[in-house]
């Protein structure tokens, strides 16, 4: 009987957590350090990272006792690569949704987050001429985010996220080579 009562007490507590969940909203922004990972790229192509930015609204829904929750954002984000003297830069509307875990003291918490994202190309050239080959971009992207950071005073979050693109976002048609977005985001978010 004691086990049944304990089980019911735990079960009711778990059910009650969403009712006490902490909802926050705010603005997130920062720098992108991105590249395009091409499959089987010849050595004649030299490439380097490119710097852009991301900015947009964000929300967070956390269960207070266990420190688990979700965050989601709608971000204007710039990604790309520099090949030779040519910059390949695209703008995306990225929508990441992450499972988040926070732990620590009320004034200073550490968090880890991971989850999928989707992106829709908003701008940038559709086709670039690079070393007599054409690189074309696609309109949709998807991938996985993995990140960590700190939260100060329950209102300021600073963190880093690695974005691993899973879809082919670029292609060099003559060489039959495809490319995926990859990169780091260094972010700050103010939550209310």
Image (spheres, grey):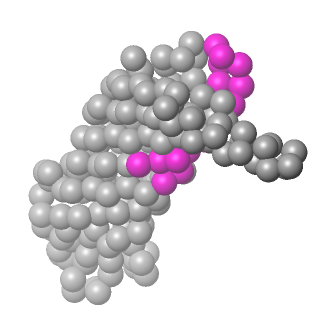
The residue sitting at 44% across, 39% down in the picture is 71
Q: Residue 165, position in %: x, y?
A: 41, 63
Quadrant hosting residue 84 = bottom left
Which region of the structure is painted magenta? Answer: 97-115
Question: Does residue 9 appear in this view?
Answer: yes
> What quarter of the picture does the C terminus occupy?
top left
- Is residue 105 highlighted in magenta? yes
Q: In the image, 153: left or right of 75?
A: right
Q: In the image, 68: left or right of 98?
A: right
The residue sitting at 57% across, 35% down in the picture is 17
What is the residue that sits farthest to the right in this orientation? 2
Q: In the image, 179: left or right of 8?
A: left
The residue sitting at 25% across, 78% down in the picture is 172
The residue sitting at 13% across, 51% down in the picture is 123
Quadrant hosting residue 187 = top left
Q: Is residue 64 above or below residue 166?
A: above
**Residue 86 vs residue 122, the one in the foreground:** 122
**Residue 171 vs residue 100, the one in the foreground:** 100
- Secondary structure mostly seen in magenta is strand
Task: Count numbered badges in the picture.
Answer: 0
**Residue 54 vs residue 176, the one in the foreground:** 54
Q: Residue 62, position in %: x, y?
A: 52, 33
Q: Is residue 127 above or below residue 65?
A: below
């Amino acid at each position: 009987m004691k086990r049944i009562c304990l089980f019911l007490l735990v079960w009711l507590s778990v059910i009650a957590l969403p009712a006490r969940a902490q909802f926050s909203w705010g603005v997130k922004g920062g720098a992108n350090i991105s590249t395009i990972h091409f499959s089987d790229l010849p050595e004649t192509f030299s490439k380097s990272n490119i710097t852009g930015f991301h900015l947009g609204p964000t929300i967070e829904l956390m269960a207070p006792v266990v420190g688990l929750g979700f965050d989601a954002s709608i971000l204007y984000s710039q990604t790309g690569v520099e090949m030779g003297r040519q910059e390949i830069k695209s703008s995306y509307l990225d929508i990441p949704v992450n499972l988040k875990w926070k732990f620590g003291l009320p004034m200073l918490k550490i968090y880890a987050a991971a989850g999928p994202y989707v992106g829709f190309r908003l701008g940038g050239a559709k086709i670039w001429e690079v070393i007599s080959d054409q690189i074309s971009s696609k309109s949709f992207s998807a991938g996985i985010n993995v990140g960590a950071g700190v939260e100060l005073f329950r209102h300021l979050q600073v963190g880093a996220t690695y974005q691993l693109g899973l879809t082919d976002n670029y292609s060099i048609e003559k060489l039959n080579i495809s490319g995926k977005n990859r990169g780091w985001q260094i972010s700050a978010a103010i939550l209310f």
